[in-house]
Amino acid sequence: MSTTPHQNTTAAGGNPDKASPETSGQSGNSPRRGLWSMAFTELWERYSFYGLQGILSFYLLYALAAGGLAVAPAVAAGIVGAYGGAVYLSQIFGAWLGDRLVSPQHMVLSGAIVITAGHLVLAFAPGFAGLGIGLVCIVVGTGALKTNITSIVGFVLDHNPDERYRDAGFSYFYMAINIGAVVGPLTTGLAQNELGFHYGFGLAAIGMVAALVQYLASMKHLPERARIVNNPLPPNRRPLVVIVGLVFVAAVGSALATGLLRAENLSTVVTVAALLAATAYFLTMTTSSAVTSDERRRILGYLPLFLASGVYFGFLFQKFTAISILITERIDLHIGGWTFPVAWITTVSPLAAVLITPLIARMWNTLGQRQPGPVTKFAIGLTQIGCAYLFLLIISEATGDAEIPLALILLFMIAAGSSEVFVGPIGLSLATKIGPKKFRSQMVGLNFLTLALGSSLAGLLGQLFTAINNASYFTVTAVCGIGIGLALLAGRGPLGRLLGAGLER
């Protein structure tokens, strides 16, 4: 994988089907086949993940009579935020394991099996015990799967030097993620609405089984690099890894047993852990003798984008915390004699991203070298989501203490969700291209840390939402989003030069 500066650092248009065939560990296999196999595996994995997450907040918030667990809103926001953050934080460890101990191909397989087990526990084991065991399995399994499957996609696309092909490939891979994020909550939300929460969890389990079957069928078509440990850990250091793992498990168990780790402070703990992990990775890569001066410069240029992306996803993932609480308290879900499934509201966000992706990708392709650089695109995304919260502030104030019409909250979801195309695929593509040669998987894991930071931050924001009035909350969110976007726009020149020549636009 090249580590030189790139012109197109974002999702560009183009047709990945036009790649020339090349052997990838099996004679006659096409990279195109490997790309679409991974895309469909990821689609079904995301179907199960977001199918669960779409109804998880409401499972915690709803009364016992409605099939929920009747958890206080602030506590529910903390649990959901911490769960999302832990899912992405675990991917740092999965990336390290896939780089040092186990091949990416086998990391993805083992992760898929553990995730499937977690969803089955949630489907069949009621109460807090089933919830805890199921979520822990999903956290561990997703940590093993997520960064390693993204690295495999990078291996598949490495053969083609055309950056537009590469970025288009990641655009379609990212679109598969969003399709799963749309279809999952649509189906699990309907099942929850008509039959109950555990039927929704069961559908998520079926989706994960489909992901596992799809991956098993495609393993033989993967590049040889997917079967190789890139930077093997010396055998004499492996016992130390086992000891560290056991100490970590013991520490978490002790914290739970003594009450140091509680539902109320889970999001805070995960946020701190994400920031510490990010700091460790940035320091490790920038101080390593294996990193060249050009690679170090690009890492430093990525740091502000990392922080901005974490804040962005904190705003976006509030659909699972603060916005979910708002929906249960102030949104009229009744349409005649039918109740609109609550999970469908949050589904509008990824649906908007799916629908706008081909249009934006085609625009980048048409603009070519005249398209804005990655910093400018991040600025657009932050400004847009800030404006979405400004719209929410206006409609919240206009309705006073009355219920907010369903159509208006759906418009907010469209505005917020469609902004993701300017941040999500941009950071993913950028991380796979500017990462140091010796830390490629870790760089992908570092990019996913923005999601960990965003998820746990969304939990903290959800708790803040329960403590102050709506007007103050939405004002702060809108001002922060727009302000950070404008700051990035003003600094696009220096940041672009750090990332590489030609990225100042």
Image (cartoon, rainbow, N blue to C red):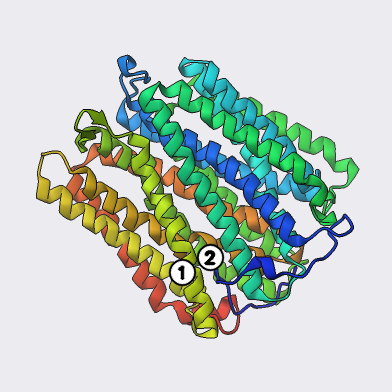
The residue that appears at 80% across and 37% down in the rendered structure is 240
Can residue 41 be seen in the rendering of this structure? yes
Amino acid at the residue labelled 2: Ile
Camera-side residue of 492 and 266: 492
Camera-side residue of 212 and 325: 212
Helix, strand or loop status at disc 1:
helix
Q: Give the Cα distance between marks 2 and 1.
A: 12 Å
Q: Is 44 placed above or below 11 here?
A: above
The residue that appears at 45% across and 26% down in the rendered structure is 262
Tell me the tag on residue 133.
none
Q: Residues within 10 Å of mark 2 (few under 14, many from 20)?
A: many
Residue on which disc 2 sits: 426
Number of marks: 2
Camera-side residue of 118 and 348: 348
Amino acid at the residue labelled 1: Ile
Tell me the tag on residue 360.
1
The residue that appears at 85% across and 62% down in the rendered structure is 23
Instruction: Classify the position of the N terminus by image quarter.
Output: bottom right
Residue 270: x %, y % from top left = 50, 40
Residue 426: x %, y % from top left = 53, 65
Residue 326: x %, y % from top left = 25, 39
Helix, strand or loop status at disc 2:
helix
Q: Is 302 placed above or below 143 here?
A: below
Mark 2 or 1: the one toward you? 1
Residue 200: x %, y % from top left = 46, 27
